[in-house]
Amino acid sequence: MKTSIGEPIKRNEDPRLLTGKALFVDDVNITGMLHAAFLRSDYAHARIKGIDTSAARERPGVVAVYTAEDMGEDWAPGPSNVAPPPAEEIIFHSRTQVPLAKGKVRYVGEPIAIVVAESRYIAEDAVEDIFVDLEMLDVVADLEAALDPETILVHDDLDSNLAAHMFQGKGDYEAAKASADLVISRRIDFDRGAAAAMENRGVIAHWEEKAQHLTVWDTTQAPIPIRNGLAARHGLPENQVRVIAPFIGGGFGPKILLHYPEEIMIPWVSIQLCKPIKWIEDRRENFLATTQERQQIHEAEMILSKEGKILGVSHTFLHDTGAYDPYGLTIPLNTESHATGGYDVPNYHSEVKVVFTNKMITTPVRGAGRPQGIFLVERLLDIAAKELGMDPVEIRKLNFIPPEAFPYEREIIDQAFTPLILDSGNYQPVMDKAVETIGYHQFISEEQPRLRAEGKHIGIGIIPFVETTGVGPYEGARINVDPSGVINVATGVGTQGQGHFTSFAQIVAEQLGVDVSDVNLITGDSAEFHWGTGTFASRGAVVAANAIHASSKIVRDKVLKLASKILEAPEEELELEGGFVRVADIPRLSISLGDLALEANPLRGTVEPGMEPGLEATAYFGPQYGAAAFGVHAMIIEVDPETMMIDIKRYVVAEDCGRILNPLILEGQIHGGVAMGIGNAYYEQLIYDENAQLLNASLADYLVPTACEIPHIEIEHLETRSPLNPLGTKGVGEAGTIPVPALYAQAIENAFPDHDFEILEMPLSPNKLFEILYKKEVGR
Amino acid sequence: MKPPPFEYYNPQSLDEALSHLAEHGYDAKILAGGQSLVPMLNFRLAQPAILVDLNNITDLAYIQNGDSGGVQIGAMTRHAQVERDPIVADRAPLIHETMPMIATTQIRSRGTFGGSIAHADPSAELVAISVALEGKFRLRSQSGEREVPAADFFLGMFTTQLEPEEILVETSFPTKPARTGWAIKEIARRPHDFALVGVATVVSLHADDRIQNSRIVFLSVGDGPVVAEKAAETLRDQSPSPELLRAAAETAAVEDIDPSNDIHASAEFRRHLAKVLTRQALETAIERAKG
Ligand SMILES: Cc1cc2nc3c(=O)[nH]c(=O)nc-3n(C[C@H](O)[C@H](O)[C@H](O)COP(=O)(O)OP(=O)(O)OC[C@H]3O[C@@H](n4cnc5c(N)ncnc54)[C@H](O)[C@@H]3O)c2cc1C
């Protein structure tokens, strides 16, 4: 079989994307379409005493205005996306987002009313005509103060702002602590950031009354669940609702929420008015009303032996869920799954309190709780290494899970609600590769002392990380051979730029002996394939790819069976190549796949019992549990001690994400992930004031790193295949972001060897570095 | 993020534009490159009833030698054109050095020299350097024309001497005196961002290398361009030395400016950066003055 998996094939989709021929939601225009704009709350917490929409309704060009009251019985919160995990003694209060605020508003940006008009311009003008009578309430803006008994409640029917409370553990942490030689305890702070995808959200809904059919174009990462949810909500059979997630300019997690208020309102309004309705989120709305992530406060502890062996990790933390908690405990579960990194840690204890605040909801953003966990364990380990006088690389090697210990049981529950098991790995060679590529030993023994003597503040960081990826429940794919010879593949996962049109095509091309460019992939259209859960948790290359692999193998079998009959040759003597089935020794005895597809779908005669027409198959894949990838990032930086500006001199990634489908696409994922991680570590912070007003809700003030800020990234690949799926793949979508905050902290500390300070918060900025470093008299 | 309704005029001559302004006064706003005004319209921070577009008045876009040396730049000249112009590079090297610090290539292709000055953003480089270079601005209305020195033109945050019926038509910069050096230094989070702090200096030396005269002008530390007068005074007639420049930088940072806190930098950090940048800018300017 000619291999295509693993080849650095250029992306099938790029010519379309780069020449503006790809369909995005905002490209859809339908005759008679109306445009919607939302009136959003300017305040984080207030009681709604009355809404006067009369002036808005009278404005010329306005077709309709709706408030929560106007929705009558159709107003309902929800749904909940993720149930509480099956942990013992868990407390969980589910409070899900509402389509339009009723009674009170709970965050700045929460929709209060929707205006539908002939143009978005008129709709926005009319939004300003609406008068809302609000009674201001105290605001829950501070994560720690939120749990004070005197603090006002975000949800009046609860006893406190506690959304969830959960314990997890392994071994006996307290007993281990009693015999530990070294105890390191620190407080660790993470603040919020945005995903800031290039394309904002958008929804277009078209209810066709006579067909009793609803079509929705949506920038969602989860088209099939959105379809199912809308059908349930509107009392329609699922096949009367079609959801299409066309090309999407970046997902990164927030586009998976099931359902945003706008995803409820736009279809609902379309049904009310029997008109197509378009809403395209603008950048300001994206900052206020698209989910965010990362805020946590940890009291963290690591216990070690004097030789540097980790005996245990413990952390008690607060996690900010914002005004509602539709995504359950996914983020804190991920933090816990990564708070012991890739290390053999016999004792572990965690306690998390998830807290309601008057801020936008948090849901997973690329990294999804993992950067916090890795930051915690790596920071504590750095501090321990200093205390013990050990080399940071050596202390890590000493503690890695050894290859023979896999599958390695953490004995806690992970985001998939299964016990966390790291399926496979071989960590030390990856560390060695990173150490060798960046020239760690030569750097610290020769180059760094020389540069320091020249007065330069130059530091090195090297951080390993695990990434749990590829969780279930399942994905599926239907593959058929088109009479034109093209191979059609339909799958339910959406696509937001990951290169699915190519990496998935490579799997099919290898099985069916066709060119990758002859594989036509359709994703995210419920009319084409209506089973699946979506693109999240770095699972496409594991779950969807293996489903595609399974169905292409069935099609291959069908091809061989039919060709054997037609060519009158045994199946073992047939080979698939260049779009033809050939008898191996007699090349002129061949038939093209297209012709074979025609033969498989005869107009007369009979399809024999037990056979199916066409060369088509549908198959599914659900992993037993997630596959764990591993990587090491290393970086050399120079810090200007006068201006606090950081210059990245080198950036190295050694990555082991199992079987590589396409190294170009893999490297693209890593580049993007690192860029996002650099943003998380040094540029991007959502800054809220004491009234939970977002102070930097624009791309002028919220600093997303651009190409100028991202260094050249050197990537090394290693492969430890996952035993949990036939392809042996592991996910990599979030890998790039995960270790970067810990890496920045380590490298900055390393750049100032004579200064005794610790970086225990994220994100950083020159201003924050000034605060941290200047207290230490640097640069005076 | 859509602007509220406005009327749009597209005059083909300066006179026509001035007559629209004379008629509509405060209700009208001039549209130049739109790189500051259009975002303000989309955020609904500015809601003018009328826009008067200057983009078809091509005779406001030019760069020429000044009457008595120096250089004259028409208000509608794009940043990109100024950036690449040989006359500017030769006669006003501080302007030449500054242009790439403004925004991105795309924005500089559209944004105008006059628009940046008329907008009077306290973070705009051109605002600070036009004061440092002792530039002059020509303002025209239907009733006549006046020339205002840069030092008098800027009144505060986004406010200038421009009357609603006036158009800034030309900026001019005098010849650079002999034994004069210049420098601009700034710190921005990303290269294309507005600076956290910036400082422009112009220093003239006596024949014996003592400092004859210096102008130190800051951006992003106040309501407009901030001239460091006390620091300049400490330099007058002194021989430049590292200690002198350090002390002058300290004076500038501590006594001449009163920066505020915002989400990007504390006042304390801004003062610190001001000190670092002033020292660096003075060093460079003096080196260049020596030739
Ligand atoms: C992302 C971004 C980054 C930027 N970064 C920087 C930066 O680092 N440094 C910097 O200096 N600038 C920066 N800018 C602003 C840019 O330089 C603008 O071009 C400039 O501020 C305004 O010029 P304009 O021609 O676009 O003016 P417009 O936006 O058209 O007008 C601005 C204002 O000036 C008035 N006006 C314009 N021309 C005249 C005139 N001839 N007479 C009277 N009034 C007039 C208008 O009525 C309006 O009030 C940035 C802009 C953006 C979008």
Image (cartoon, rainbow, N blue to C red):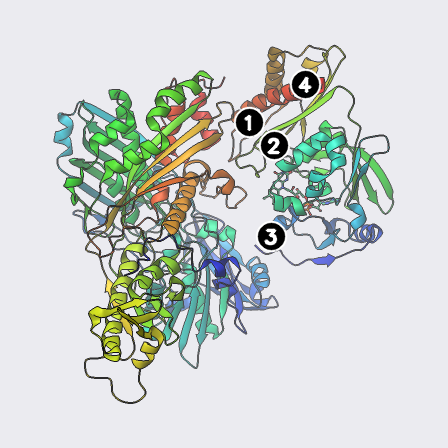
- Of callouts 3 and 2, the N-terminal one: 3
Q: Mark 4 is on which residue type?
A: Ile
* Cα distance between the residues tagged 3 and 2: 24 Å
Q: Residue at x 45, y 66 (%)?
A: A266
Q: Are marks 1 and 3 in contact (CB under 8 Å)?
A: no
Q: Is residue A329 left or right of residue A242?
A: left
Residue plotted at (23% across, 51% down): A626
* Residue with the mark numbered 2: B220
Q: Residue at x 38, y 62 (%)?
A: A516
Quarter of image, res A258: bottom left
Q: Which residue is mark 3?
A: B42
Horizontal side of A6 relative to B70 (left or right) equals: left
Instruction: Name the residue type under label 3.
Output: Asn
Q: Is residue A308 above or below residue A167?
A: above
Q: Does the CB distance between marks 1 and 2 fall below 8 Å?
A: yes
For label 4, the crowd category at 10 Å Cα-Cα, with few meaning under 14, some 14 to 19 and many 20 or more, is many
Q: Dot 3, how many residues are within 10 Å of its Cα: few (below 14), some (14-19), or many (20+)?
A: some
The kind of secondary structure element at disc 3 is helix
Q: Does the residue at mark 4 contact the one at mark 2 (Cβ under 8 Å)? A: no
Whole-angstrom CA distance, mark 4 to mark 1, is 24 Å
Give the alpha-carbon distance from disc 4 to disc 2, as whole Å. 24 Å
Q: Between disc 4 and disc 1, whose residue precedes?
A: 1
Q: Are marks 4 and 2 on the same chain?
A: yes
Report whether A282 appears left or right of A71: right
Image region (quadrant) for ligand 1 = top right
| The image quarter in which residue B161 lies | top right
**For mark 1, does the 10 Å Cα neighbourhood hold few (<14), some (14 to 19), or many (20 or more) residues?**
many
Mark 4 highlights which residue?
A: B286
Mark 3 to mark 4: distance in Å? 44 Å
The amino acid at mark 1 is Arg
